[in-house]
Image (tube, rainbow, N blue to C red):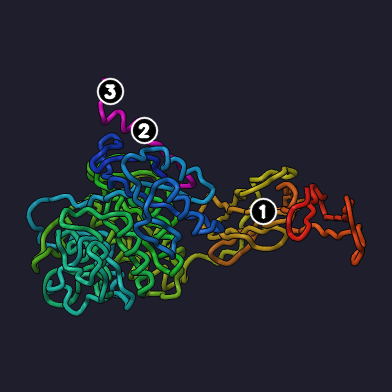
């Protein structure tokens, strides 16, 4: 007999789109989709997140949700997302329909993200990780800056002495109010790892110990955070001046809606750091350019058995036995990639403080190029580009101002529709684009006029051919990188054939016999002349307003 676990796993459909994973499923809270050794994701019953494609009409997309029996719970306009509720009876079919629809970039169930905290041994007497990543050498040049580091978590203890005068206003997206106090204890530990006050005669020192801390509560008393709360918090933090945001939760690197929000955060000049996870497995996820994913190391630079790894890992950082702040004004030793990520966030804060003009892409490139290469030479799935080195990263930023200027333009070509094809109705235009650093945007043109812009691979746009005259038309695309270099595709000619245009011209008619003013008797023949741009199908005659028979 098939178990519910097996049935649900068979129902799970995974669609990979250049690193973005859209899960097609209608799971109950607590349903499972397992990677070996990993804790299962937790889904919110009947709740989904849809991203409307660039160029698609938002009102039409909302109508489509309604036709599928859905109800819109929230609109997240900056990233063209809809949080929707589908009744349990609807099942899998509408979710698959949304994923196939030309109006939607992706459709995914709302998930809750588990905090990656792992309890550890008794208190340590010092912060071993600071010397390991050469933080003291970095502090000779810079101790932090003025841009807030956003901590998206269970809140932050506002009365902790190591945060005195350091907290700036954030927001509570779990309860939708301004109370960002810690309700679970995880966020306070994370905040201290990144930016606890230094040189203040008490407690510990975070990496960027003069940066303000922006507490963003996205989790409840269980420590779990929803996609939509994280998305809104990233956008709010970006719009309120944060240049670094930390997410110490599992599964961030493979959640398409959060990656889209992280892309928005990057577009505002900041970087998002996230935990690689504490499951000791490779979950098979690809790399993403929008999040710095961090695996955890021990004091001997090995990965603890619980440290997750994979192609998505960008760098490694200390995460075992980290001495940090705890809720209630205390300090303790904690372990998990929950603390590797904010340590990395603190170093990124130092980079932006050392050279505020750095782009997010430059800051990440400096971080990776100056990490201590461990494991296999070059990039590997355990350490990414290496274990964090704060001193080398800061001095590189000050000495070179980042990587050499990027002067190479992207390449781009139209992949659909094919040249010479005949199209009608709503058509998805797709383009393939590549660059030595990364493509940030693709613009689509029909007959030289821009119709849509897409900023995430796979690049595509929706073209309503009904707004275009029948006949031959030309499709083209431009691709841009972060340095502003532009590459243009070869034009592709297609033929639009939507049938004849609607006939909106009325016929003209006039009486030709009998003549006006004549006197009549007996049976009289009435004649008329009628013309039309298409053709006259019927003429009716009236005498004194009554139809003549």
| First of labels 2, 3 by sequence position | 3
Which residue occupies 56% across, 55% down? 436
The vertical placement of 521 against 177, above or below, is: above
- The residue nearer to you, when weighing 353 against 277, is 277
Is label 2 in contact with label 3 (beta carbons under 8 Å)? no
What secondary structure is found at the residue carrying circle 1?
helix
Q: Secondary structure at mark 2?
A: helix
> Mark 2 or mark 1, which has the lower sequence index?
2
Observer-nearest of 227 and 369: 227
Residue 46, numbered label: none
Report the magenta residues as a range.
1-19
CB atoms of marks 2 and 1 within 8 Å: no
Q: Residue furthest top?
A: 1
| Secondary structure found at label 3 | loop
Dot label at residue 11:
2
Neighbour tally class for label 3: few under 14, some 14-19, many 20 plus, Cα within 10 Å: few
Disc 2 from disc 3: Cα separation:
13 Å
In the displayed structure, does residue 372 sit left or right of residue 536? left
Residue 333: x %, y % from top left = 13, 57
Disc 1: which residue: 466
> Measured from the top left, where is residue 332 in percent x and y?
11, 60
Distance between mark 2 and mark 1 Cα atoms: 37 Å
- Residue 408 in magenta stretch: no
Q: Tell me residue 125's x, y (percent).
A: 10, 61
Q: Please give the residue where the numbered disc 3 appears in the rendered image.
A: 2
Count the marks: how many?
A: 3
Location of residue 83 by image quarter: bottom left
Q: Nearer the viewer, mark 2 or mark 1?
A: 1
């Amino acid at each position: 007999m098939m178990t519910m676990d097996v049935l649900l796993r068979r129902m799970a459909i995974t669609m990979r789109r250049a690193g973005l994973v859209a899960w097609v499923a209608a799971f109950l809270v607590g349903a499972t989709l397992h990677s070996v050794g990993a804790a299962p994701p937790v889904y919110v019953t009947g709740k989904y997140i849809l991203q409307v494609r660039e160029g698609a009409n938002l009102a039409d997309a909302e109508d489509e949700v309604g036709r599928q029996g859905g109800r819109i719970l929230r609109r997240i306009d900056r990233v063209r997302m809809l949080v929707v509720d589908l009744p349990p009876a609807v099942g899998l079919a509408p979710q698959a329909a949304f994923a196939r629809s030309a109006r939607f970039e992706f459709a995914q169930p709302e998930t809750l993200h588990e905090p990656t905290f792992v309890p550890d041994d008794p208190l340590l007497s010092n912060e071993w990780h600071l010397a390991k990543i050469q933080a003291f050498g970095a502090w000779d040049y810079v101790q932090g800056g003025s841009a807030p580091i956003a901590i998206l978590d269970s809140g932050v203890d506002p009365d902790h002495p190591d945060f005195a005068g350091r907290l700036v206003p954030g927001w509570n997206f779990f309860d939708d109010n301004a109370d960002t106090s810690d309700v679970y204890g995880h966020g306070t530990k994370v905040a201290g790892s990144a930016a606890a006050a230094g040189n203040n005669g008490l407690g510990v020192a975070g990496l960027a110990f003069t940066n303000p801390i922006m507490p963003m509560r996205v989790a409840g008393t269980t420590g779990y955070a929803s996609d939509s709360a994280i998305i809104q918090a990233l956008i709010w933090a970006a719009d309120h001046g944060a240049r670094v945001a930390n997410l110490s939760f599992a599964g961030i690197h493979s959640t398409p809606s959060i990656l889209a929000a992280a892309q928005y955060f990057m577009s505002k000049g900041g970087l998002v750091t996230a935990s690689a996870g504490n499951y000791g497995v490779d979950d098979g996820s690809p790399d993403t350019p929008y999040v710095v994913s961090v695996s955890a190391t021990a004091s001997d630079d090995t990965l603890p058995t619980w440290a997750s790894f994979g192609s998505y890992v960008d760098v490694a950082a200390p995460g075992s036995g980290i001495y940090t702040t705890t809720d209630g004004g205390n300090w303790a030793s904690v372990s998990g990639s929950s603390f590797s990520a904010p340590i990395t966030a603190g170093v990124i804060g130092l980079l932006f403080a050392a050279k505020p003009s750095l782009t997010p892409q430059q800051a990440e490139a400096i971080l990776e190029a100056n990490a201590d290469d461990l494991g296999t030479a070059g990039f590997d799935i355990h350490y990414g580009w290496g274990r964090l080195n704060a001193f080398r990263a800061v001095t590189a930023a000050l000495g070179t101002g980042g990587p050499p200027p990027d002067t190479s333009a992207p390449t781009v070509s139209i992949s659909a529709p094919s040249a010479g094809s005949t199209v009608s109705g709503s058509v998805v235009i797709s383009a393939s684009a590549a660059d030595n650093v990364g493509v940030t945007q693709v613009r689509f043109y029909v007959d030289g006029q821009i119709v849509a812009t897409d900023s995430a691979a796979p690049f595509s746009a929706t073209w309503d051919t009904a707004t275009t005259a029948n006949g031959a038309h030309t499709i083209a695309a431009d691709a841009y990188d972060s340095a502003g270099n532009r590459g243009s595709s070869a034009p592709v000619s297609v033929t639009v054939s939507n049938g004849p245009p609607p006939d909106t011209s009325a016929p003209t008619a006039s009486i030709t016999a009998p003549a006006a003013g004549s006197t009549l008797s007996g049976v009289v023949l009435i004649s008329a002349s009628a013309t039309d741009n298409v053709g006259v199908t019927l003429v009716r005659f009236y005498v004194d307003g009554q139809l003549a028979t």
